Image (cartoon, grey):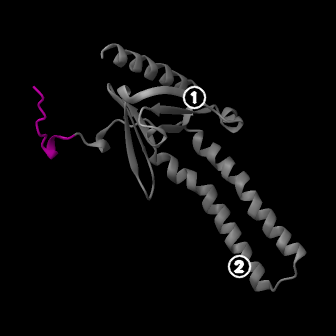
């Protein structure tokens, strides 16, 4: 007979008390390099605007203040955001947290996982970083991608999760 007993709210586990694993220490620097490369476009644009179009000095000062402010914030952001990301591997699931302003915690149970892969861009490989992507039975909206893992750690996690997925399939 089917039973579905209630659980008291006070008995629920607290996600903040999990032993979170941090992302790789070089991930902040990797993101700063990427953001620095992206910030080059507005810097080049502002330089071209300043050199090619005669404009009042106030307009040029405002333009450069905006561009430099954008570049500084864009460069600093990874050192704020990356420490607020983390993951933990538990007996029945993988849990991932992220977010500075909009925070989220995602738990992916092994019995919902269909496929796991690691990937890395050329910039990732330069820093020894990889991403772990977990594909679930719920479709792309319920998939999970953890950026910023050490390449060796990402591969070990991939193998471990696939072993757990295989074990959960055999137990059903």
- Whether residue 164 appears in magenta in the rendering, the answer is no
SS category of the residue bearing label 2: helix
**Other-residue count near label 2 (Cα within 10 Å), few / some / many at <14 / 14–19 / ≥20:** few
Q: Left of 139 or right of it: where is 75?
A: right
The magenta segment is: 1-12
Q: Is residue 122 above or below residue 77?
A: above
Report how far apart the C-alphas of labels 1 and 2 lie in the structure: 44 Å
The N terminus, quarter of image = top left
Residue 118 shows which numbered tag?
A: 1
Near-viewer residue (9 or 151): 9
Q: Residue 11 sits in which quadrant?
A: top left
Q: Does 66 sit above or below residue 82?
A: below
Q: Residue, x 69% and y 74% (percent of image)?
A: 65
SS class, disc 1: strand
Badge 2 is on which residue?
62
In the picture provided, is 110 more to the left or to the right than 43? left
Say if the magenta span includes residue 8.
yes
- Main SS, magenta residues: loop
Q: What residue do we see at 70% from left, 38% from top? A: 123
């Amino acid at each position: 007979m089917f039973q579905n007993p209630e659980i008291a709210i006070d008995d629920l586990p607290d996600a903040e008390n999990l032993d979170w694993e941090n992302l790789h220490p070089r991930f902040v620097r990797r993101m700063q390099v990427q953001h620095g490369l992206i910030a080059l476009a507005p810097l080049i644009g502002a330089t071209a605007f300043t050199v090619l179009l005669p404009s009042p000095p106030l307009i040029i000062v405002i333009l450069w203040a905006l561009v430099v402010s954008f570049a500084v914030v864009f460069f600093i952001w990874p050192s704020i955001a990356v420490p607020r990301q983390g993951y933990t591997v538990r007996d029945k699931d993988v849990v991932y947290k992220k977010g500075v302003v909009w925070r989220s915690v995602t738990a992916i149970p092994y019995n919902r996982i269909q496929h796991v892969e690691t990937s890395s861009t050329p910039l990732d490989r330069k820093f020894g970083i990889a991403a772990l992507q977990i594909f679930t039975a719920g479709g792309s909206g319920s998939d999970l991608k953890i950026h910023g893992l050490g390449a060796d750690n990402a591969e070990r996690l991939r193998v471990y999760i696939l072993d757990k997925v295989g074990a959960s399939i055999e137990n059903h």
